[in-house]
Image (spheres, helix red, strand yellow):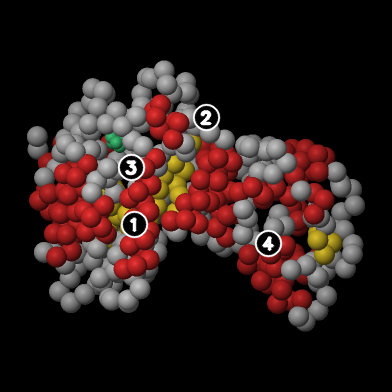
Amino acid sequence: MILKDKIKILAESAKYDVSCSSSGSSRANSKNGIGNASIGGICHSWSEDGRCISLLKILFSNNCIFDCAYCINRRSNDIERATFTVDEMVNLTINFYKRNYIEGLFLSSGIYSNPNETMNSLYMVAKILREKYKFNGYIHLKAIPGADPLLIKKAGFYADRMSVNIELPSEKSLKILAPQKSKSSLLVPMKSLSENILDLNRFNVKNHKFVPAGQSTQLIVGASPESDYKIIKLSENLYDKFKLKRVYYSAFLKVNEDNRLPNKNSSLLREHRLYQADWLLRFYKFKAYEIFNKGNYFLDEKLDPKLFWALNNFDLFPVEINRCDFDTLIRVPGIGVKSAYKIFNMRREKSINFDDLKKINVVLKRAKYFITCNGRYMDFSLKDPDKIKQAIYLENKGNLIPLFQDNLPVISIR
Ligand code: SF4
């Protein structure tokens, strides 16, 4: 098979993995080297459907001995198969880089012979790129479930980011849909990566960091019946226990006929709401149990999760803008982290009114139900959370609601 055909097959096969983001690495160029993964040197972009397009995103092989129900590359599918050699993969990356097609490499693989051999190929690609070609561009490698942890560790010295895709949010669903995987085959490498990231990066040795951009994972949403709460709770645990940089959510796409799978694709809006809830965990100091309290296990697709939480906890409002603490302030719908800082700074100088809030870009059409300025509401008309919810549903009919008005990094929106 000629190389061009392999590229076509293996790039196509990689498109369902969304866990690639180059943020967080600062590997600089070195003398006689090529490439630069420093924050200014990599500018990754996102295609319309939310996929990262600045990296060469490709599989080493789409031959897989596993048979995960949801995966296009599963063993039982009759599809065209291809596997690179290590040299082909290295040359491809270097040539694409030199032509300015890419800024880095996102390399995953089907498990084409056994986990160790597959992991070893990924490791060798990264090692040769770094050592022989002095490639300092961004490299994201998959850690192959079931591979020897020592091999994964060796790869970590050449990768900027690594990821183990959990895919399914419970062991029960893994057993049904990905029977060759187990919770431990996924969590053991994650745990060991997280320990090594902490241990091996204590000394600031330039260009010899271990997985400097940290690890990430991907969860498929809607292939199995787990609730949004279960998914966000799992993400919370992964952030807390393994210090993951990112959890990516991917709405289930039905690519296989299989009676273990749902009949249709999962909602992209659900995926979007999960990203927003994840944002609340990481930047707004929410806990999963708070977002989903009062018996809610699924987010309301028509409301962003912060508004959803605020309406479900209406007894905590209104908050007085001139007195409340920072953590309370950032929980108010319509007030983001940046505007909360502005409110705090302004409060040192004067008593804040609604005109002041407008000037610092607080989204008053959201915040007005939840705040007072000097004891007064902006709008007396609605104080019943159900009526507010209905008013917002009507207002947003047909639109996605922008959740955070501050210039925080853009989350994946499809
Ligand atoms: S191990 Fe990965 S590539 Fe293989 S079938 Fe499962 S999800 Fe697909």
Classify mark 3 as within 8 Å of ligand 1 or not, answering yes or no: no
User: Distance of mark 4 from mark 3, alpha carbons?
Assistant: 38 Å
Q: How many marks?
A: 4
Between discs 2 and 1, the one toward the N terminus: 1
Mark 3, Cα crowd under 10 Å, few <14 / some 14-19 / many 20+, is: some
Between discs 1 and 4, the one toward the N terminus: 1
Residue shown at 77% from the left, 81% from the top: 349
User: Distance of mark 1 from mark 4, alpha carbons?
Assistant: 33 Å
Q: Name the foreground residue: 43 vs 373.
A: 373
Q: Quadrant of residue 348?
A: bottom right
Residue shown at 33% from the left, 35% from the top: 181
* Residue indicated by mark 4: 330
* Residue indicated by mark 1: 193
Residue 185's label in the rendered image is 3
Q: Is residue 112 left or right of residue 44?
A: left
Amino acid carrying label 1: it is Leu
